Image (tube, helix red, strand yellow):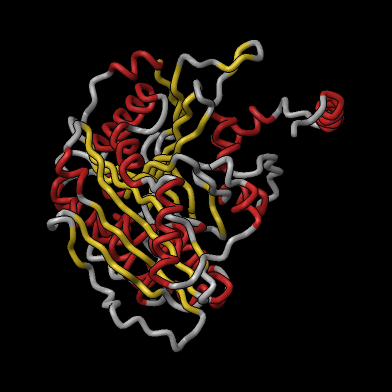
């Protein structure tokens, strides 16, 4: 059933009454002020948590020119991990499945065949024993792929979160680490450079803090640390391409300093900063982007030079692992992307410029994420039909049905 026109008009009227009380004419100026005066650097308790890497500038590139520009990296590889999503069963188990793949540009079908599959399982019953679970990786598909079952630490209140985040992070980082030797020019993770949600657990509920400093999370974080080191050894830059940035660290820090930031999160603020308008219409002729910045606060603090990396040893100067980032705004779709890279690469002027040119060119050409990221996403994605099939197979093996909610019934036809 759809809304009758009278209700649509009423809702629009209510929206108008809200809009009458909102004046954002000065938000553009405030965004510019934040960029100029507060991010060079932004300090928290005297510590610089966001500051420029090199120049501190806002830039733009004509869409057509950028799309056709020569790219510094002839080939690129992307890694992504798709998930089933947390699924509870009537026998008390909660599990998730992550399925990681590497895509390449140009295409390499042999490479695309390889996968890393992780099944994470949570049991509330401490006496549950899985006799066939060895917690080791094993090969299948004629040696092209690897698989693993992992029993995650017991956290009754956070079972869904732990099975999901650990499956995703372990599958992605393992697959990237096992295949990094095949990358010649550029490696792009589909998502953050480091597992931000795992790193966040160190500042959350006591139960999650204990998990954060346990062996399972340490293994995942160590994979990312070793991946950075492997890329440094090979001279292959590593970046994380975040398609849906959600952080609110900068705006929260500004609020704490008494700056009345009107935006709900950092994405809204940087979108306002980079969006260009003329006569009330959005300009779509140029991709706009920031220069690079260090990030040492919030979920990025553990990987800063004075962070503890959740207890994982870093074999090189800790400053080389610090997260740096730039923001890219694609005006035709009206979306903001965040690009992350270790300081080991962006502190080199030539590499930093090459990464900037590569990313801006690909975003302009693809009107979205780089081609290697798109390919990895397509390879790793677990479709709706596949999710339903997997749940049925688990039910058969467990002899227990998965716990359905009304949403399973409500949205069944839409799927």
Residue 61 drawn at (x, y percent): 40, 19
Residue 407 drawn at (x, y percent): 63, 52
Which quadrant of the figure has residue 405? bottom right
Which quadrant of the figure has residue 339? top left
Tell me the residue at 44%/66% (across/down).
Answer: 395
Q: Nearer the viewer, residue 413 or 48?
A: 413
Residue 32 relative to residue 290: left or right: right
* In the depicted structure, whether residue 362 falls above or below residue 245: above
Tell me the residue at 50%/46% (across/down).
Answer: 41
Q: Nearer the viewer, residue 368 or 91?
A: 91
Tell me the residue at 36%/38% (across/down).
Answer: 54
Asked if residue 347 shows in the view, the reply is: no
Quadrant (top left/top right/bottom left/bottom right) for the N terminus: top right
Q: Nearer the viewer, residue 389 or 300?
A: 389
Residue 19 drawn at (x, y percent): 81, 29
Residue 367 drawn at (x, y percent): 41, 24
Asked if residue 89 shows in the view, the reply is: yes
């Amino acid at each position: 059933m759809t809304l009758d026109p009278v209700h649509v008009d009423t809702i629009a009227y209510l929206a108008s009454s809200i809009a009458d009380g909102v004046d954002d004419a000065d938000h553009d100026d405030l965004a510019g002020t934040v960029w100029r005066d507060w991010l060079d650097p932004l300090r928290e308790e005297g510590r610089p948590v966001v500051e420029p890497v090199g120049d501190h500038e806002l830039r733009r590139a004509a869409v057509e020119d950028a799309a056709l520009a020569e790219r510094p990296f002839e080939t690129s590889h992307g890694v992504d991990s798709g998930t089933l999503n947390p699924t509870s069963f009537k026998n008390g188990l909660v599990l998730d499945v992550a399925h990681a793949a590497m895509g390449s540009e140009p295409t390499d079908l042999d490479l695309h065949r390889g996968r890393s599959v992780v099944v994470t399982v949570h049991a509330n019953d401490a006496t549950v024993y899985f006799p066939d679970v060895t917690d080791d990786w094993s090969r299948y598909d004629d040696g092209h792929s690897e698989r693993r079952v992992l029993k995650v630490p017991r956290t009754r209140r956070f079972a869904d979160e732990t099975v999901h985040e650990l499956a995703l992070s372990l599958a992605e980082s393992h697959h990237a680490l096992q295949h990094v030797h095949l990358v010649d020019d550029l490696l792009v993770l589909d998502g953050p450079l480091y597992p931000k949600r795992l790193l966040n657990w160190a500042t959350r509920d006591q139960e999650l803090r204990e998990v954060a400093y346990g062996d399972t999370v340490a293994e995942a974080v160590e994979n990312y640390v070793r991946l950075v080191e492997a890329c440094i050894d090979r001279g292959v830059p590593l970046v994380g391409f975040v398609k849906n940035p959600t952080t609110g660290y900068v705006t929260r820090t500004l609020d704490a300093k008494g700056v009345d930031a009107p935006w709900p999160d950092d994405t809204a603020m940087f979108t306002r900063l980079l969006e260009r308008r003329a006569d009330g219409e959005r300009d779509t002729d140029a991709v706009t982007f920031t220069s690079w910045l260090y990030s040492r606060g919030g979920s990025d603090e553990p990987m800063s030079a004075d962070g503890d990396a959740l207890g994982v040893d870093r074999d090189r100067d800790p400053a080389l692992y610090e997260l740096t980032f730039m923001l890219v705004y694609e005006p035709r779709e009206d979306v903001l992307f965040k690009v992350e890279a270790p300081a080991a690469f962006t502190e080199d002027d030539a590499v930093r410029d090459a990464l900037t040119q590569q990313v801006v060119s690909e975003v302009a050409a693809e009107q979205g994420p780089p081609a290697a990221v798109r390919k990895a996403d397509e390879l790793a994605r677990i479709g709706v039909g596949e999710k339903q099939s997997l749940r049925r197979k688990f039910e058969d093996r467990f002899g227990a049905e998965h716990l359905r909610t009304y949403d399973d019934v409500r949205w069944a036809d839409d799927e």
